[in-house]
Amino acid sequence: MTQEMSDSNRINHNNGITNTKATISLILGILSILFVILWFVGIILAIIGLVLGVIALQEIKQTNQPGKKLAVGGIICSIAGIVLPFFFVVLAYWVFMTPTVY
């Protein structure tokens, strides 16, 4: 009874249109990875993509709209876009600061 009641309380806008925020989140996540060399641009894109991905997941859960995989992919790509610049900075520091013995 409670399951039927909670399902009927959900707004159902499932008209086949994919959640736009999920699509934008994925696009921004991919762009953040591509802009890893310009870390300030990549991180800004990744943060916006991460926020939009989380908002999209909440909307998809409430409205049963398609696009959950796009939102999750956007979140994953955005996290990668945030982590990769820091990884490359640590890697560059390690490579260039290691003493070389000739």
Image (tube, rainbow, N blue to C red):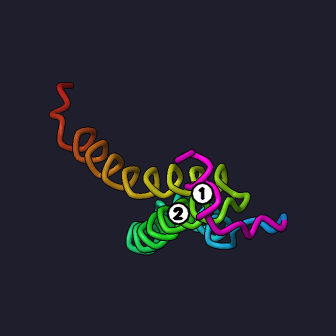
Measured in 3D between alpha carbons, the distance from the residue under mark 2 to the one under mark 1, in whole angstroms, is 5 Å
Left or right of 54, for residue 98: left
Question: At which x and y percent is residue 35?
Answer: 52, 65
Q: Are marks 2 and 1 in contact (CB under 8 Å)?
A: yes
Name the image quarter holding residue 15: bottom right
5 w.r.t. 32: above or below: above
Taking depth in this image into account, of 97 and 101 the one nearest to the observer is 97
Mark 1: amino acid: Ala
Label 1 sits on a secondary structure element that is: helix
In terms of sequence position, does the residue under pointer 2 or pointer 1 come before the other?
2
Q: Which residues are magenta?
A: 1-15
- Residue bearing the label numbered 1: 71
Question: At which x and y percent is residue 68?
Answer: 64, 53
- Residue bearing the label numbered 2: 53
Q: Is the N terminus in the top left, top right, bottom left or bottom right quadrant?
A: top right
Question: At which x and y percent is residue 42?
Answer: 46, 67
**Is residue 31 among what the camera can see?**
no
Taking depth in this image into account, of 20 and 84 the one nearest to the observer is 20
Taking depth in this image into account, of 99 and 9 the one nearest to the observer is 9
Mark 2: amino acid: Gly
Q: Residue at x 44, y 69 (%)?
A: 51
52 w.r.t. 66: above or below: below
Left or right of 46, for residue 12: right
33 w.r.t. 44: above or below: above
